[in-house]
Image (cartoon, rainbow, N blue to C red):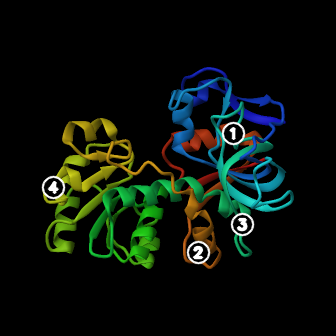
Amino acid sequence: MNAVRFHEFGEAADVLRMDQADVPDPAADRIRVRVHACGLNPADWALCRGLFPGKLPRGIGLEVSGTVDAVGADVTDVAVGDLVFGSADYAGGHSAGAADFAIMTNWARIPEGLDPVQAAALPLVLETSYRSLDGLGVTADHTLLVHGAGTMVGFAAVQIALIRGARVFAAAGDTYAERLRALGATVTSYGEGMVERVEQAVGGPVDLVLDTAPASDALPGLVRIAGGDPRRVLTVSDPAAASRLGVRTSFDEDQPRTLRYDLLGEYARRAADGRFTIPIARTFPLADWRTALEISAGGHARGKLILLP
């Protein structure tokens, strides 16, 4: 089968290549799917650089949708022929989701009304944003600033926080500002004066801040927006600055450790009903993976990038 893989660690553009690989067999608690769509994320390029190192070669593509092709001996909730989506096993074999076939570790059925391409955009951003909001303890009693609300994790976090009943402020660029307002968030732009704009809109500091924007010098200002308390700020993108400032990260010992893939079914139904969405920027044939990489690495994806094996 075709599979995008790396045989050594390094920058993704240097180490990734299209390989011919054996079709993997599922373990007892896994399933195999013929991949319909594979979502790409910055985490894929981090894997190439050595995040969660393991046996090589390895593949990229952490989230997929596809048709069940084989089931492990202990799997009873799906059968061959079912249409599912979820997380691909990037650590247990020699390939991941960017391939003709993939082994899945967590899955849910794709409900009627949800396109498999849209389903493939959900798993990682949903899991990351939901768990991050849990780590902050966001409830209906809080005001929350999502810094980087135009990223896909940020876009998801805004929606989840609004579902929880929180009052949500979103710092974002022009691409998704109007869509964020339509969801119910109060939107402000990045850059000079952001702290003052948010404080004026809120009438003081916000209760909590989730930072999902690419690493920058924004964290000191976000701490100020949170009343000067760095423990009321969590970043998923700038751990180096967080350690200097005392800001929380997803890797802190007090953060939730259980991955929230149990939510896939619920949010797939929301997505099918038009009550939750992740914007898709472009789709690419699997053979055009390098074009998708270049767009992602350039920081101008403007939404989710999807490979179609």
Give the residue at mark 2: 270
Residue 72 vertical position relative to residue 129 in the rendered view, above or below: above
**Mark 3: amino acid:** Ile
Q: Residue at x 40, y 61 (%)?
A: 149
Horizontal and vertical percent for residue 198?
A: 22, 66
**Mark 2: amino acid:** Arg
Give the residue at mark 3: 110
Whichever of callouts 2 and 3 sits on the residue coming sooner in the sequence is 3
Question: Visible in this render: residue 302?
Answer: no
Mark 3 nearby-residue class (10 Å; few <14, some 14–19, many ≥20): many
Distance in Å between CA atoms under marks 4 and 3? 42 Å
On the picture, is 113 further left or further right than 195?
Answer: right
Label 4 sits on a secondary structure element that is: helix
Name the image quarter holding the N terminus. top right
**Mark 4: amino acid:** Arg
**Mark 1: amino acid:** Ala
Give the residue at mark 4: 224
Give the residue at mark 1: 96
On the picture, is 137 further left or further right than 13?
Answer: left
Whichever of callouts 4 and 1 sits on the residue coming sooner in the sequence is 1
Whichever of callouts 4 and 3 sits on the residue coming sooner in the sequence is 3
Label 2 sits on a secondary structure element that is: helix
Label 3 sits on a secondary structure element that is: loop
Mark 1 nearby-residue class (10 Å; few <14, some 14–19, many ≥20): many
Residue furthest out toward the top: 8
